[in-house]
Image (tube, coloured by chain):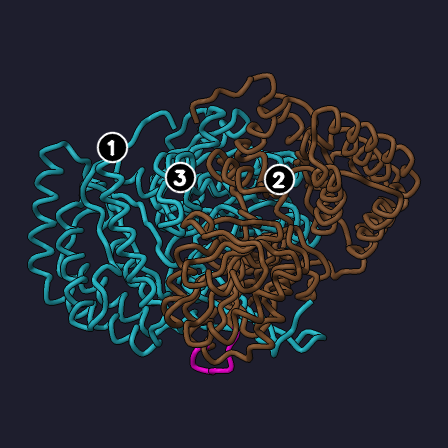
Chain colours: A brown, B cyan
Amino acid sequence: MSHTIDPSVVEHVNQLADRARVASRRLAQLSRAEKDAALHALADALVVATPQILQANAQDLDRGRANGMSEALQDRLRLDEQRVAASAQGLRDIAALPDPVGEIVRGSTLPNGLQIRQVRVPMGVIGMIYEARPNVTVDAAGLGLKSGNAVILRGGSAAGATNWATVIALRLALAGQGLPEDAITLLGEGGRDAARALMTARGRVDLVIPRGGADLIQTVVRESTVPVIETGVGVCHVYVDRAADLDQAAAITTNAKTHRPSVCNAAESLLVHREVAADFLPKVLTDLANAQVKLHVTPDVRPYAEASSAAYAIASEQDFDTEWLALEMNVAVVDDLDAAMEHIRRHGSGHTEAIVTEDRAAARRFTAEVDAAVVMVNASTRFTDGGEFGFGAEIGISTQKLHARGPMALPELTTTKWIVEGDGQIR
Amino acid sequence: MSHTIDPSVVEHVNQLADRARVASRRLAQLSRAEKDAALHALADALVVATPQILQANAQDLDRGRANGMSEALQDRLRLDEQRVAASAQGLRDIAALPDPVGEIVRGSTLPNGLQIRQVRVPMGVIGMIYEARPNVTVDAAGLGLKSGNAVILRGGSAAGATNWATVIALRLALAGQGLPEDAITLLGEGGRDAARALMTARGRVDLVIPRGGADLIQTVVRESTVPVIETGVGVCHVYVDRAADLDQAAAITTNAKTHRPSVCNAAESLLVHREVAADFLPKVLTDLANAQVKLHVTPDVRPYAEASSAAYAIASEQDFDTEWLALEMNVAVVDDLDAAMEHIRRHGSGHTEAIVTEDRAAARRFTAEVDAAVVMVNASTRFTDGGEFGFGAEIGISTQKLHARGPMALPELTTTKWIVEGDGQIR
């Protein structure tokens, strides 16, 4: 990294991290009952502080509008009484989840009588670097607390006032429970250098999780010396095989693209086996056109797009690498299963890939050979989600292979420790 | 990173990584029987190629001596027929271990009928960066193959000829089995830039594991953009509590320090509760003196060191951070359990920490509060080892919290993939 970080910012961040570390030692020893009581206290505090939080949010929105913030971003940033109440309910839901800390993952008694067991313990101090959505502040604080970790939150500056008002309420509630306020720290000053100092506070911070767009995530991955879990970029494909049930395939495609286009598990590309293209494309492109989806098509899809009333353009190679996060979709015809998997290898982001087929051999090859966090047969990519998977919470979706892959919930915020008990064994 | 990597080296390394990636796809689909047969073929090939390997090793040793290589390093580098045979046997032992790939970690049927399961799959391409020991070349190749991964090996240049002779034999054996030679790649050219190119081949290489001294590991951690598992630096403590069985404590201390001082799970520091110092120190320091251990002591330990016939010096603060890897040990008196844990927090490397005590409360606090990969009660730190833990193999000992912590074996070289099967589910 050629850029030098302002030393006073580094010192400030290190001090905050050291205080979070002291708090984390206390958190690691809390019982589930203590943590759950604290989570309910945090929820109560959010409800009580709603007027202050909404006032701060109005300031952020005013500032955003003055700076020309887009309507979509304003919508992500905007809070109302219901959204704050939903965040508070989220904390109560986290309280209802099992405590991952203390779980014995495996263990045995060795031939020499040593008893060994691998136990889940908190990471320690977790840094979260994220963008405009202020609900991430509450989610991360709650998931951190339940998993026994102190969190250092670096939210987007666009939500600065909202995040301050939120974190002040949460810290007061912690103090009211006799818990260290430094369990939840907002990194609100120091500009980009503060985020850089957080990513390079190796030994002080145990893990950094970036949540946001591809640029944010790439910056964190490149510059961080603290271990990172990469989340979220989803260039997800639906491949409609020769042996697909075409009605099912159309329903899955439309759902995967249009149910909530702005999220990472939405599909960006549709691949269709050449043998079913003539039967399948007229129907699915009409469905997509009716849902206002703009198409980016290969030349052999063009006649179908032309006939469908859809808005379309010829796709560039780069389009196939694009996470549209909008009502836009790439459509290509492929020669066979191998060509579909090769396309996914070249353009996929390792998030979620789906095949629609009634052919058992094709399904087996696709699930075995496609390298992604989640591989689906005959289901919408939209199911890649901690809530849908039954985890009860989600801190993000990992697209890397180390530590966690796919939806991450409470256990993914822990590490393990081996405990070895003997009566004087030596080698 | 201010240093620019030679572009031709980057291109060379990327080409090797891309070929390893193609090989890894084949490896991921192999059955256990195919992998085990290949491991036996690799072992046979090593035995057959022993004369060539020993001749190459003699060249490396000649070059080393000419360059003034220390006796200790020469000993690490030196191979003989027995050592090669032991490496070959290591491959057969790996063949006998269960295959981690395909294990179903967890799974369930969701309320909507979707069947989800989390399955162990290979990482893909793993880079190993290590120093002089040529046996790491064979171990890493064998563990990589069994776990379905392609490996790119970057050994120390001091063992260059030995590693080439070894890898040529292994690759020929792979070809003889009809398997891709690129499953095992030696990165033997390009100097330091080659190692740098490997660490920054993000998207091409899935994981880098450094094995060696603290400098090597810190360089990889700082410069790598590929995810890293940090291994090995062990500043391990033995804390002798007020309630210790002192004979047991002396035996554990001497074993932890002297059984094999050059490895990471050897103890570097002894902490003694003030109340038992007068009873314990005369005995243990005499034992350590008899084993030729040089002591680095705090002033309050000095009278006991003086009386023990041990070689000693007053310890500096820095001594307590030092991984001696030799017959040297720090000795300090601490006021109580809290002071011992505070000392370990300040100086430990998160590897292995041991308490010797008969006090149940002290043991419980120590195991709960000390933050290390392995925490022991009444046992020698030397037991932190994949073989001792019953894993049958070890690629290193992780001292980081992400993905793997403590001894790493075959499952730690895998990641997981979620497979979701439905019959048309949409949201």
* Residue at the disc numbered 3: B224
Counting residues from the N terminus, which is met first, the one under dot 1 or under dot 2? 1
Which of the numbered marks, if any, corresponds to residue B341?
Answer: 2
Residue kind at label 3, given as amino acid type: Ser
Q: Quadrant of residue A132?
A: top right
- Please state, as top left, top right, bottom left or bottom right, where the N terminus of chain B lies in the image: top left
Q: Helix, strand or loop at disc 1?
A: loop
The magenta segment is: A356-362
**In the foreground, B13 or A344:** A344
Question: What residue is at 24 percent from the left and 32 percent from the top?
Answer: B6
Compared with B117, B155 (above or below) is above
Do pointers 2 and 3 mark residues of a single chain? Answer: yes
Badge nearest the viewer, 2 or 3: 3
* Residue at the disc numbered 1: B6
Q: Residues within 10 Å of mark 1 (few under 14, many from 20)?
A: few
Gap between marks 2 and 3, in whole Å?
32 Å
